[in-house]
Image: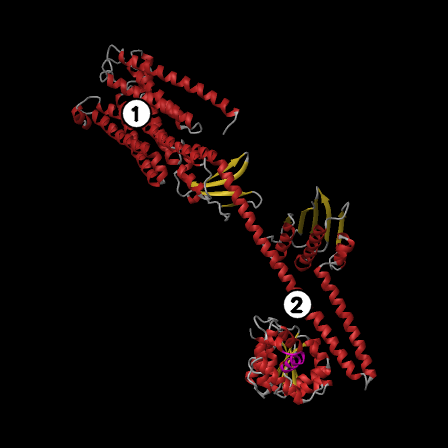
């Protein structure tokens, strides 16, 4: 899988590149800011672009805007946005334009080689990735009035979180050491309790769950 | 304006006035007696009355003016003019000496009248043309008159009942005497015409306020010079048969032109009194002002009240802020004092020897300094009150601005720390985490490579620690709390490129916040020196004087530091002033910079 890495911090970028290469990815370009990133992607047509959210010149959300621009130019490109801080608002904003081939991951997460590899793969294959701590924040978010999330069992809440992270039923089943069938039952229950329209499509499912979690 | 000294100083003039008034009364009585007891040619009551009217009115007006405005020379000149009129009337005497004296000085008082009119109201002949006109008037009225008598100008045939000869007659040369007399008249007429023009020009140039004060005198003066011209023409015509004289024909009376002149001249004194009275009316406005100020006027109303009392709507009141060394209005907005040439004048208001305000007013008010003095004396307390309010307001505004700057600086500082943490330590730690992640995956298959990666991670960690240490010193130097200001300063100096001499004279440690402020003051000063000063040496002095910490940083660099410009110096000032301290900057270009902070320790 061919990858481009964009981060203004050199030590971080180099470390990331080394890690990705160790994991067997083909790093074909590096960029220090959004403009350079767009140029690299246009030139090399990678499968995945890994983008730091905070880059020059303003050091706020350049990466986020670059990701949107990349998606508009190259709809099949996978974009994995890296962030130093847990910021649910950014994640929702990123995923609200479509969850296919989009990821939002905390930087701490990338030191785990397996987790990084899995996230890059999933995004590259058109799946979605949402950092568990962001999902945790959303699930724990206090809602006004009656909160249907409160009605979920612990197991169902666990499944909800993994759904929000962008995992498929099979991945969830593997993670929880249960059968795929069990997961399906949990998912049906969750959709019923949260009053969401049932859908088999993973991407729509992520969006529905996120929209629900982010609402109210 | 109070105090015993002034009262005793006034006792002298009072005595002088009484003496002069008595002398004038006596002179008038003597003059009337001389005029009426001349058996050969008796004066009419009208003539006597006019001489007395002119003499007494001038002396009286002069004395009032003299007392009212001692610094103005018009008062004494008027008194002298009045006495000269009495001297001139001695021409009616049978005594040869008195007759000669009167005859010689008869027109002299006209020179006095010219001087009064030309110098009104300031009391000075303003420019060269005024001085020339007065000199010409003296020449015509005194010098040529005496010359005319010396050359035998006195003709007993034209003067029924007069002595046949004056004492100073040296020759009887009718032709020369006539020439001198003719010159006298022509010169008199010219003086009258030009003075008339001068008055007219002064009227045009006068501001509305000045016009209202000088109007009576200017108009009467115009009349005087007009009549003078007629009088001179008439005298010239009188050399011919009597009935050709225009005024003779108009008034059908022999001495009519003389009487007309006398009448108009007498009115000069009254016009002058009227001018004085108008000023007096202005002064009664001071009484209104005092009543008005009895209740504390709302902010800004004081200016309006003063403007009414001074009759100058354009009045601007500027309050003096001694600390900031600048003028502000009652809203604490800066005010610029006007230039002289703007037609504006500035009067300073002082109270107990301290400057409190400046009044910017129409230059015409300079003619009446006493009015300004009494108005400001009446309003001094109210002015001081409003000045204090303006000062307070300025302080509050400065305080709010400095507080906003402090908050801003603190905010910027936090952002800087966040950036430093984000860009430095956090990235380094993430990178170490990645190295460790890599080590983890290498460990089973390639322990050698894993060991190299571990050393790398350890080196990265010590670098991260070093960065954290520097960052936390930037937030607050630990050495300051642990070891005190001297050690902290020493550490600062150790990290400075320029050689620094440190001189500390402290009996004990300063309070914590003062130490912190002093530390940052020196740190910032050293940073500034490194950035801008190009200094070869720096000396730092820390001492405690009168319960205040004194911190001084002196360099021998290029100077020219501007306390108002640049955030560095302003930040320093804010930090020092936040503790009630004072920052002074001395930085002449090319002669180094001395920054001194005085911070109260109590």
Tell me the crowding category of disc 1: few under 14, some 14 to 19, or many 20 or more residues within 10 angstroms, Cα based: many
**x, y percent for residue B579:** 65, 49
**x, y percent for residue A39:** 59, 82
The residue tagged 2 is: B419
**Residue that appears at 36% across and 25% down:** B61
Vertical placement of B133 versus A120: above or below?
above
**Residue that appears at 33% across and 21% down:** B55
Helix, strand or loop for disc 2: helix
Would you say residue A143 is visible in this rendering? yes
In the displayed structure, does residue B527 sit left or right of residue B35? Answer: right
Magenta region, mostly helix, strand or loop? helix
**x, y percent for residue B547:** 70, 43
Q: Quadrant of residue B408?
A: bottom right
Q: Which mark is residue B266?
A: 1
Would you say residue A27 is visible in this rendering? no
**Residue B533 magenta-drawn?**
no
Tell me the crowding category of disc 2: few under 14, some 14 to 19, or many 20 or more residues within 10 angstroms, Cα based: some
**x, y percent for residue B298:** 46, 42
Helix, strand or loop for disc 1: helix
Q: Which chain is home to disc 1? A: B
Q: Which residues are magenta?
A: A152-163
Q: Marks 2 and 1: which is nearer the front? A: 2
In the displayed structure, does residue B361 sit left or right of residue A118? Answer: left
Q: Which mark is residue B204?
A: none
Between residues B391 and B271, which one lies in front from this camera angle?
A: B391
Gap between marks 2 and 1, in whole Å?
A: 92 Å
Between residues B282 and B588, which one lies in front from this camera angle?
A: B282
């Amino acid at each position: 899988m061919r990858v481009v890495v964009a981060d203004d911090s050199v030590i971080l970028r180099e470390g990331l590149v080394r890690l990705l290469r160790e994991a067997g990815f083909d790093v074909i370009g590096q960029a220090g800011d959004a403009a350079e990133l767009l140029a690299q992607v246009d030139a090399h047509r990678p499968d995945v672009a890994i983008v730091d959210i905070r880059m020059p010149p303003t050091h706020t959300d350049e990466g986020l805007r670059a990701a949107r621009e990349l998606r508009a130019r190259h709809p099949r490109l996978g974009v994995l946005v890296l962030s130093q801080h847990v910021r649910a608002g950014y994640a929702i904003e990123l995923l609200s334009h479509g969850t296919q081939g989009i990821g939002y991951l905390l930087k701490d997460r990338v030191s785990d080689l397996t987790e990084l590899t899995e996230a890059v793969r999933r995004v590259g294959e058109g799946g979605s990735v949402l950092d568990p701590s962001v999902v945790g924040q959303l699930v724990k978010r206090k809602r006004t009035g009656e909160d249907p999330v409160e009605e979920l069992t612990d197991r169902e809440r666990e499944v909800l979180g993994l759904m929000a992270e962008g995992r498929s039923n099979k991945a969830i089943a593997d993670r929880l050491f249960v059968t795929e069938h069990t997961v399906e039952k949990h998912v049906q229950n969750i959709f019923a309790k949260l009053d969401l329209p049932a859908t088999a499509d993973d991407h729509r499912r992520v969006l529905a769950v996120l929209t629900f979690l982010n609402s109210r | 304006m109070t105090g015993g000294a002034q009262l005793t100083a006034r006792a002298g003039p009072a005595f002088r006035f009484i003496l002069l008034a008595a002398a004038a009364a006596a002179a008038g009585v003597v003059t009337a007696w001389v005029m009426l007891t001349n058996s050969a040619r008796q004066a009419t009551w009208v003539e006597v009355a006019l001489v007395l009217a002119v003499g007494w009115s001038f002396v009286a007006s002069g004395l009032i003016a003299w007392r009212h405005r001692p610094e103005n020379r018009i008062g004494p000149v008027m008194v002298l003019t009045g006495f000269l009129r009495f001297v001139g009337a001695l021409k009616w005497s049978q005594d040869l000496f008195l007759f000669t004296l009167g005859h010689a000085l008869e027109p002299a008082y006209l020179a006095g009248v010219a001087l009064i009119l030309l110098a009104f109201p300031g009391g000075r002949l303003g420019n060269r043309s005024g001085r020339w006109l007065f000199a010409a008037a003296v020449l015509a009225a005194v010098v040529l008159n005496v010359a005319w008598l010396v050359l035998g100008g006195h003709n007993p045939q034209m003067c029924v009942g007069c002595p046949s000869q004056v004492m100073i007659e040296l020759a009887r040369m009718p032709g020369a005497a006539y020439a001198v007399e003719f010159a006298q008249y022509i010169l008199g007429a010219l003086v009258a015409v030009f003075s008339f023009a001068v008055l007219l020009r002064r009227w045009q140039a006068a501001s509305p306020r000045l016009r209202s004060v000088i109007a009576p005198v200017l108009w009467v003066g115009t009349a005087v010079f007009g009549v003078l011209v007629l009088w001179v023409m008439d005298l010239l015509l009188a050399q011919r048969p009597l009935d050709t004289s225009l005024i003779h024909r108009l008034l059908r009376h022999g001495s009519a032109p003389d009487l007309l002149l006398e009448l108009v001249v007498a009115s000069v004194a009254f016009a002058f009194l009227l001018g004085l009275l108008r000023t007096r009316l202005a002064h009664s406005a001071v009484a209104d002002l005092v009543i008005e100020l009895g209740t504390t006027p709302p902010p800004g109303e004081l200016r309006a009240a003063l403007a009414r009392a001074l009759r100058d709507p354009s009045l601007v009141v500027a309050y003096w802020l001694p600390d900031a060394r600048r003028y502000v209005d009652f809203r604490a907005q800066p005010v610029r004092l006007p230039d002289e040439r703007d037609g504006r004048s500035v009067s300073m208001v002082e109270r107990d020897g301290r400057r409190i305000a400046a009044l910017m007013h129409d230059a015409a008010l300079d003619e009446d300094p006493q009015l300004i003095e009494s108005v400001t004396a009446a309003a001094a307390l109210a002015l001081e009150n409003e000045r204090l309010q303006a000062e307070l307001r300025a302080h509050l505004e400065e305080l709010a601005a400095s507080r906003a700057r402090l908050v801003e600086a603190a905010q910027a500082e936090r952002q800087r720390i966040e950036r430093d943490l984000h860009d430095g330590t956090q990235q380094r730690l993430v990178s170490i985490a990645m190295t460790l992640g890599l080590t983890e995956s290498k460990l089973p298959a390639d322990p050698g490579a894993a060991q190299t990666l571990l050393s790398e991670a350890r080196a990265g960690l010590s670098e991260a620690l070093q960065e954290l240490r520097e960052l936390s010193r930037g937030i607050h130097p630990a050495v300051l709390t642990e070891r005190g200001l001297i050690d902290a300063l020493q550490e600062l100096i150790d990290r400075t490129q320029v050689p620094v001499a440190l001189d500390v004279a402290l009996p004990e440690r300063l309070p914590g916040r003062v130490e912190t402020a002093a530390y940052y003051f020196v740190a910032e000063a050293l940073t500034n020196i490194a950035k801008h000063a190009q200094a070869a040496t720096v000396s730092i002095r820390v001492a405690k004087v009168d319960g205040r910490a004194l911190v001084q940083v002196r360099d021998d660099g290029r100077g020219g530091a501007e306390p108002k410009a640049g955030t560095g110096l302003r930040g320093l000032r804010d930090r020092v002033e936040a503790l009630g301290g004072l920052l002074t900057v001395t930085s002449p270009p090319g002669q180094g910079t001395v920054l001194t902070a005085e911070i109260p320790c109590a």
